[in-house]
Amino acid sequence: MSGMLVTLLIQIIGGAIGGNVVGGAAKNIDLGTIGNTIAGAIGGGVGGQILGMLIPLLANTAATPDIGAIIGQAAGGGVAGAVLTAIVGMIKNKSAA
């Protein structure tokens, strides 16, 4: 697999995990398991790509066996996934009220 695809997969998985963590931690923004996973994966992929553009050191670094870069990609995707899940959960709650 190419380095860019591996990087994107790491970010998507990290985002899905981050989305589920924030959904489980804050029940008022929980979208359900599938909703948290989808929102988190989208946030992780998009946010991770934006992070890669802002911090060139992290761009396509998963192709190299550097564990620090891989952890950075996973953490960036996880945070972005958690943020998008929280935003979508808040919007859902505001529209339901």
Image (tube, rainbow, N blue to C red):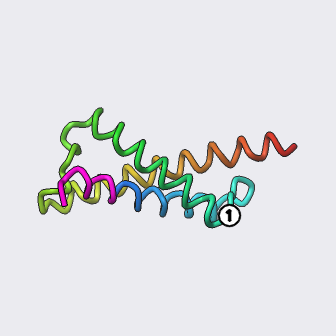
Q: Quadrant of residue 2?
A: bottom left
Dot 1 corresponds to which residue? 32
- Residue 24 spot, x, y in % from top left: 63, 65
Which SS class for mark 1? Answer: helix
Check the image and name the residue furthest to the right: 97
Count neighbours of disc 1 (C-alpha within 10 A) and say few if under 14, some if 14 to 19, many if 20 or more: some
Helix, strand or loop: magenta stretch: helix
Magenta residue check for 5 = yes
Q: In which quarter of the image is the C terminus?
A: top right
- Residue 88 spot, x, y in % from top left: 64, 45
**Residue shown at 19%/61% (left/top)?**
1
Q: What stretch is highlighted in magenta?
A: 1-9
**Residue shown at 48%/60% (left/top)?**
16
Q: Which of 78 and 25 is in front in this view?
A: 78
- Residue 85 spot, x, y in % from top left: 59, 50
Asked if residue 56 is positioned above or below residue 8 in the image, the reply reads above
